[in-house]
Amino acid sequence: MSERLRVCALYPDLMNIYADRGNLLMLRRRCEWRGLGFELTGAGIGEPLDPDAADLFYMGGGQDRDQELCAADLYEHKRAALAQAAQRGALVFGVCGGYQLLGHAYQLGTEELPGIGLLDIRTVRADGPRLVGNVAIAVGLPGAEGRVLAGFENHGGRTHLGPGAAPLGRVLHGHGNNGQDSQEGARSGNVIGTYMHGPLLPKNSWFADWLIAAALDDGAELAPLDDQLELLAHADARKAAGL
């Protein structure tokens, strides 16, 4: 297993409105407490992306206007590099707006934001209320089947999975991708997306560790930590979601 986790945050100045820095800080702390190195870089509008420069590429959520700017740049300037990174085994993780842009497209009425097609999903802005509230899912991740992720969702888009993607998990409480099919998030190989934010990782330390291990070396075991406070945070998130 590598002794250093390299993380690249995509559009950290724009796609960060849902406490996405908290997720990055959680990854840093979980590494540092184990004596693992941690390197964080960013790639913004107009900046090149090196597909070999990170073990984990992370993209958070943003406002509609900012997401539109990032969608164009992502498609035109970073799509090929991210595809190369995923192909060589890097982990690509998108939250909320970042999740939507990992798919084929986000249809906003007559306007369509291009996605980069790393996930076989499509998102539309449907009539009706936003899907908002606490949410919990039973995940289907390899080695973590049935474990619970608990967080918060707030999205107007309705995401539908194609045959090339599996859901990240089954909804136990909340709305999920579209409020209809009891699915939340999506995954395909080492590309993962979810609507859960708030941020997600401090409420689910086990998932932070899963991401670290998968990014460093698939199947690697991390040294255990004293997670007394983290387990309490997870229990509170589950309770808020009715579990």
Image: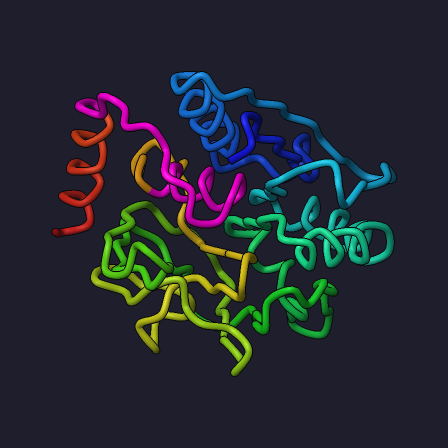
**Left or right: where does residue 227 sit relative to residue 104?**
left
Residue 14: x %, y % from top left: 67, 36
Question: Does the magenta run of residues contain 216?
Answer: yes
In reply to whether residue 15 is colored magenta, the answer given is: no
Is residue 96 visible in this depiction of the protein?
Answer: yes
Whether residue 21 is situated above or below residue 80 in the rendered picture: above
Residue at position x 33%, y 28% in the image: 223
Q: Residue furthest bottom?
A: 163
Identify which residue is drawn at 24% across, 52% down. Answer: 148
Residue 205, position in %: x, y? 31, 35
Residue 142, quarter of the rendered image: bottom left
Q: In the rendered image, which quarter is residue 57 located in? A: top right
Q: Residue 35, relative to residue 21: is it above or below?
A: above
| Left or right: residue 192 compared with residue 150 | right
How many numbered marks appear? 0
Q: Residue 88 location in percent, x, y?
A: 69, 54
Residue 31 is situated, as x and y percent measured from the top left of the image, at: 45, 24
What residue is shown at x 49% (from left), y 21% (from top)?
Answer: 36
Closer-to-camera residue (124/78) = 78
Residue 126 shown left or right of residue 7 in the figure: left
Q: In front here: 66 or 241?
A: 241
* Residue 89 or residue 12, whichever sits in front: 89
Residues shaded magenta: 207-229
